[in-house]
Image (cartoon, rainbow, N blue to C red):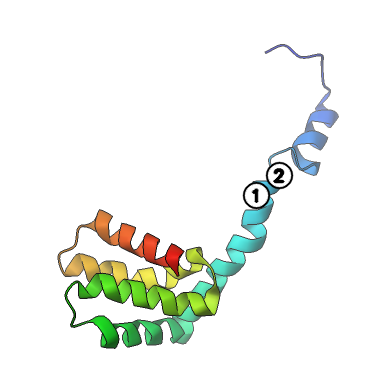
């Protein structure tokens, strides 16, 4: 834990004003890009575009064997053509498909895993 000695001003400069500190590359990317994708996903949910793609997926695959999981895959594919982000995709289609899968008897871990894989694949 020994060091050659740093004054308070040097520590503050290093930790807050350079890319080596707490506002480094990961926080910068999170604040810049992930926030925008999440905001876009919320926009899709509030405008009803997300619900439209979910309804289309239900009409395509809702009656098939394994329907809810297939609905998640189709819905994620449709959502990702709009957003291009797996994070925004989970927010928009996952808010609909995960509760649907849980309601129909899928385990919550499986429902989350299906949505994560479908969104990443989308």
Find residue 26 and report its horizontal and vertical position in percent. 64, 48
Q: Which mark is drawn over residue 103?
A: none
**Residue lying farthest to the top in this orientation:** 2
Q: Please name whichever residue, 116 or 108, is drawn nearer the observer in this view of the structure.
A: 116
Q: Is residue 96 visible?
A: no
Q: Residue at x 82, y 16 (%)?
A: 5
Find residue 25 and report its horizontal and vertical position in percent. 69, 47
Q: Is residue 17 visible?
A: yes
In this image, 16 relative to 34: left or right?
right
Q: Secondary structure at mark 2?
A: loop
Mark 2 burial class by Cα count in 10 Å: few <14, some 14-19, many 20+? some
Q: Which residue is mark 2?
A: 24
Q: Which residue is mark 1?
A: 27
Report which quarter residue 12 is drawn in.
Answer: top right
Find residue 42 and report its horizontal and vertical position in percent. 49, 74
For the N terminus, the quadrant is: top right
Q: Residue at x 35, y 81 (%)?
A: 54
Q: Is residue 72 above or below residue 49?
A: above
Report which quarter residue 122 is drawn in.
Answer: bottom left
In this image, 89 relative to 110: left or right?
right
In this image, 97 relative to 93: left or right?
left
Q: CA distance from mark 1 to mark 2?
A: 6 Å
Q: Is residue 27 above or below residue 98?
A: above
Q: Residue at x 24, y 73 (%)?
A: 68
Q: Are marks 1 and 2 in contact (CB under 8 Å)?
A: yes
In this image, 98 relative to 32: left or right?
left
Q: Secondary structure at mark 1?
A: helix
Mark 1 burial class by Cα count in 10 Å: few <14, some 14-19, many 20+? few
Image label count: 2
């Amino acid at each position: 834990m020994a060091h050659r000695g740093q004054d308070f001003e040097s520590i503050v400069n290093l930790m807050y004003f350079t890319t080596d500190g707490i506002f480094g590359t990961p926080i910068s990317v999170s604040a810049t890009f992930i926030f925008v994708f999440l905001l876009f996903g919320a926009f899709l949910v509030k405008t009803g575009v997300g619900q439209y793609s979910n309804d289309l997926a239900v009409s395509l695959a809702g009656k098939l064997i394994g329907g809810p999981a297939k609905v998640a895959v189709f819905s994620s594919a449709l959502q990702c053509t709009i957003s291009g982000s797996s994070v925004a995709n989970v927010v928009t289609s996952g808010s609909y498909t995960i509760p649907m899968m849980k309601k129909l008897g899928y385990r919550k871990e499986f429902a989350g895993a299906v949505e994560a894989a479908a969104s990443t694949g989308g």
